[in-house]
Image (tube, helix red, strand yellow):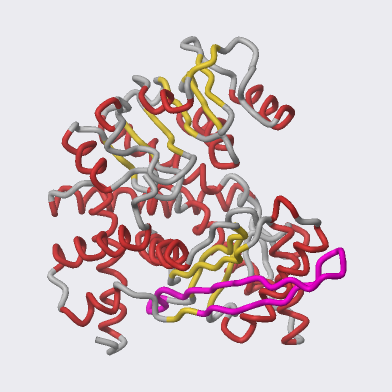
């Protein structure tokens, strides 16, 4: 499904929301494009002594509601359009959650899988040297994304503080706990999604103790497997897949044992007591809840007719194509769109910024409670928009987010 350009999809979603909101032409045009884009070339010394050039980006899509917020990816196939789209979705995501933030995204075109820790540190520091004057707690706050992690953020924060000669840990989020990270960040994305599922089960009358399946078993998928049973008081995980294959057991898979197996062997394949199944067939099982937590465009025109899950919680970015969205809605299947379902991560990152600002840290219980409040409220706000505007859930979430950003732009006198 590579024919989909992510940025064109994001812009189309903005146009649809703008039409429903009757936004004027100037406001619509403003929201269709990033407010600032930075492209830079970074010379980095490699372990063999060679100096290699890397291309980096930072895009601040909109900051009418607050500092830009969004991850930094290290990926060999990174493109400016992918980063534009992700920066846009971060803008709508923070607005849907009613966080005082905008949206941003960054990336470096590189392959971290073929690099040493020293080389990754050199790239991380070079990136910050390129963007230091454009980021900050009141400007733009990065976080980890694909192939970056808390250690990456630690290097970046240190480089930023070295350049500015200030202590400002809140400039990066999802840092190690010892240098300003927060409790409750590791499972925040999955926990936010499962909170949405819990609320959806109440609204739709779906059995919260029924069956569920997970497509993709990286960090978000693993955490969802564990948190689902905790928050819903039960539920039977019957199928999972990762990049190497899928497994199935109608009598249920033990989430804790499965996570241990994945961490030990690198895959879910071969888990004791399970039967192998095709990866894609995990999406098509007759379950109460499905978590697409892998790649974009996983649910598309080729398989949408076979999707049966009552609730589909999008932990991945853009796992459903625009045409499949409409079909799922017509089939009566309830999609919790990614800009709502995966917003737990940015919500707890916001909590981390708050804690860093006044150097006082909350315990995990407080973080979980405040996350629950934010996500639950956002879920029901989107539900109200679905009923009021008579649109499918993704468009309803976009309407909520776009309306809030448009209002901030108007109040500032930009349009």
Question: Is 359 situated above or below 321?
Answer: below
Q: Quadrant of residue 205?
A: top left
Residue 156 rendering spot, x and y as whole percentages: 71, 70
Q: Quadrant of the C terminus?
A: bottom left
Could you tell me what secondary structure mostly forms the magenta stretch? strand
Residue 166 rendering spot, x and y as whole percentages: 74, 84
Report how many numbered discs are placed on residues in the image: 0
The residue lying at 28 percent from left, 50 percent from top is 394
Using the image as rendered, state which of residue 227 and residue 396 is in the foreground. 396
For the record, the magenta segment spans: 38-65
The residue lying at 23 percent from left, 53 percent from top is 396
Horizontal side of 19 relative to 274 (left or right) equals: left
The residue lying at 76 percent from left, 86 percent from top is 165
Using the image as rendered, state which of residue 374 and residue 28 is in the foreground. 28
Residue extending furthest bottom? 413
Using the image as rendered, state which of residue 100 and residue 82 is in the foreground. 82
Horizontal side of 319 relative to 189 (left or right) equals: left
Q: Quadrant of residue 174?
A: bottom right
Q: Is residue 62 found inside the magenta-colored segment of the image?
A: yes
Question: Is 193 situated above or below 19?
Answer: above
Using the image as rendered, state which of residue 33 and residue 184 is in the foreground. 33
Question: Is 1 situated above or below 13?
Answer: above
Q: Is residue 102 found inside the magenta-colored segment of the image?
A: no
Residue 191 rendering spot, x and y as whole percentages: 51, 43
The residue lying at 61 percent from left, 25 percent from top is 268
Q: Quadrant of the N terminus?
A: top left
Q: Quadrant of residue 100?
A: bottom left
Residue 359 rendering spot, x and y as whole percentages: 69, 70
């Amino acid at each position: 499904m590579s024919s989909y350009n992510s940025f064109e999809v994001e812009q189309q979603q903005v146009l649809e929301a703008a039409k429903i909101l009757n936004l004027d032409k100037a406001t619509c045009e403003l929201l269709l494009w990033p407010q600032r884009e930075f492209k830079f070339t970074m010379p980095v010394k490699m372990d063999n002594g060679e100096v290699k050039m890397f291309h980096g980006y930072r895009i601040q899509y909109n900051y009418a509601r607050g500092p830009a917020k969004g991850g930094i990816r290290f990926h060999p196939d990174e493109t400016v359009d992918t980063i534009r789209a992700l920066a846009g979705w971060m803008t709508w995501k923070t607005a849907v959650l009613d966080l005082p933030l905008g949206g941003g995204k960054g990336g470096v075109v590189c392959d971290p899988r073929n690099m040493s820790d020293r080389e990754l540190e050199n790239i991380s520091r070079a990136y910050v040297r390129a963007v230091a004057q454009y980021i900050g707690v009141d400007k733009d706050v990065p976080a980890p994304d694909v192939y970056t992690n808390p250690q990456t953020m630690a290097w970046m924060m240190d480089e930023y503080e070295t350049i500015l000669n200030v202590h400002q840990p809140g400039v990066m989020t999802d840092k190690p706990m010892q240098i300003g990270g927060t409790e409750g960040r590791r499972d925040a994305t999955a926990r936010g999604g499962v909170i949405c599922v819990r609320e959806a089960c109440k609204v739709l009358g779906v059995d919260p103790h029924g069956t569920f399946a997970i497509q993709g078993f990286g960090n978000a998928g693993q955490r969802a497997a564990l948190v689902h049973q905790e928050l819903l008081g039960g539920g039977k995980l019957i199928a999972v897949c990762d990049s190497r294959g899928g497994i199935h057991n109608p009598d249920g898979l033990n989430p804790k044992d499965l996570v241990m197996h994945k961490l030990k062997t690198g895959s879910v394949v071969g888990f004791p007591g399970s039967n192998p199944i095709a990866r894609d067939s995990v999406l098509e099982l007759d379950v109460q809840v499905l978590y697409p937590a892998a790649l974009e465009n996983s649910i598309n025109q080729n398989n949408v007719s076979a999707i049966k899950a009552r609730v589909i919680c999008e932990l991945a970015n853009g796992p459903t194509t625009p045409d499949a969205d409409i079909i799922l809605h017509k089939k009566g299947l309830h999609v919790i769109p990614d800009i709502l379902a995966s917003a737990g991560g940015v919500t707890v990152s916001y909590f981390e910024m708050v804690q860093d600002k006044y150097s006082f840290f909350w315990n995990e219980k407080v973080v979980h409670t405040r996350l629950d409040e934010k996500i639950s409220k956002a879920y029901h706000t989107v539900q109200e928009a679905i009923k009021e505007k008579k649109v499918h859930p993704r468009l309803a979430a976009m309407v909520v987010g776009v309306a809030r950003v448009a209002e901030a732009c108007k109040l500032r006198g930009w349009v």
